[in-house]
Amino acid sequence: MRFISTESLKPGLRLGKSIYNERGQVLLNEGVELTDRLILRLKEMGIPFVYISDQKTDHLNPRNSISDELRREAIQTIESTFAQLESADLASSFVIEKASKRLMELIRTIMNEIKGNQELLSLLSDVYTYDHYIFTHSLNVTLYTLAIGMELKLNQKQMEVLGMGAILHDVGKMMLPTEILMKPGRLTDEEFEVVKRHSEYGFQILRGVQNLPLLVAHCAYQHHERLDGSGYPRGLKGDDIHSFGKIIAVADVFDAVTSNRVYRRAMLPHEGLEILYAGAGIQFDKKVVEAFRKAVAIYPVGLTVELNDRRKGIVSRQNMGISDRPVLEILEENGIELNKPYELNLKDHLDLIIVNCETTFLSNRKN
């Protein structure tokens, strides 16, 4: 299967991997032949990338980072918790207190699945659409956050508190006006000032939950703070920001830029990583960014890449701990398509680097 941009789809191509909504219901089945109408539907659903069936690469089978059942349960738990908060008084924390046991069980299950998965975390391999971005975003940030925490060798208790802070980091958004929270386009400066209050709202909600550590509230409070003081709501700098706030900040930014929005296209993972690297040591903690790089797949399985020696190949699997050095199947040399592709492990060839990524499907064949 090939990982390509929805914008480059052409009629006649076949879907290589089923597409689900956030409740786990199949929207488009694997193997369906794409038509103009179906391609338009995919674009309207805001799905940035899909897997396309291709005879040469159909033996590649990208694995979901967590099971479909767990993802469905997680989204439903987050949605029901946040929905109850939306109608609750700002000073009331009983909703979170009541949901905290279920949320903690969910976090522990997610940790076990991530630990049991022998591949790097790759959420773009899980092709889902969503009705409410905030719920999916909360789950994705939790997955990235836990992957970073594991790479940093945090203990079980630290991981549980960190996971709870991540899953609830945006809970304050339930206190924002619906017309601003659900606005499909870019926010005005005035609307953005309103949105920025969600960090303080989240802190006020979570600090009153008796069975949650106060640190969970500070995760909501600090996930938009930056090392150089350019963040909000308090403009904290350096060590004044808790390490958990620094971790969630990296996960939050990466998921935001790699998700499709009405006003901008989704970035590929390596593009999102470039943003983190550009801010490493300035806005983001270098150790956290490095841990992220080791834990998360930067080049998804199925992505077509070009090397500095002009060879082209497709990512076939990952090397644990070195996400920027995947294993490739070389399909083309000097512009000539090979009859017999061969494997090339970039871990063993440090002189070779990926210089370009292609998210278009160049073949006109119907496979």
Image: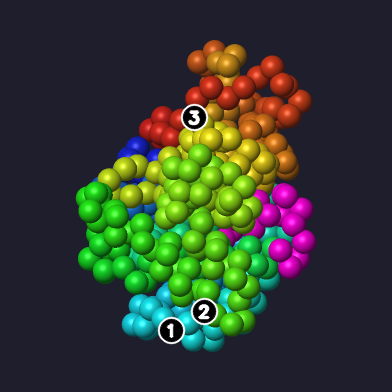
Provide residue 275's location: percent of width, then percent of height.
Answer: 49, 36
In the rendered structure, find residue 92 and report the number of the disc placed on it.
Answer: 1
Whichever of callouts 1 and 3 sits on the residue coming sooner in the sequence is 1
Quadrant assignment, res 210: bottom right
Q: Is residue 4 left or right of residue 244?
A: left
Provide residue 284's location: percent of width, then percent of height.
Answer: 55, 41
Q: Are marks 1 and 2 in contact (CB under 8 Å)?
A: yes
Q: Whole-Å distance between the Cαs marked 1 and 3?
A: 49 Å
Q: Whole-Å distance between the Cαs marked 1 and 2?
A: 8 Å
Relative to residue 345, is residue 297 depicted above or below? below
In the rendered structure, find residue 324 and report the number of the disc placed on it.
Answer: none
Residue type at mark 1 is: Ser
Relative to residue 244, is residue 24 depicted above or below? below
Of 143 and 199, nearer the camera is 199
Disc 2, SS: loop
Tell me the crowding category of disc 2: few under 14, some 14 to 19, or many 20 or more residues within 10 angstroms, Cα based.
some
- Magenta part of the protein: which range? 142-158
Residue under label 3: 357
Q: Are marks 3 and 2 in contact (CB under 8 Å)?
A: no
Whichever of callouts 1 and 2 sits on the residue coming sooner in the sequence is 1
In the rendered structure, find residue 208 and report the number of the disc placed on it.
Answer: 2
Q: Does the magenta stretch include residue 331?
A: no
The answer to whether residue 251 is visible is no
Of 133 and 38, nearer the camera is 133
Q: Is residue 88 left or right of residue 204?
A: left
Disc 1, SS: loop
Q: Is residue 148 magenta?
A: yes
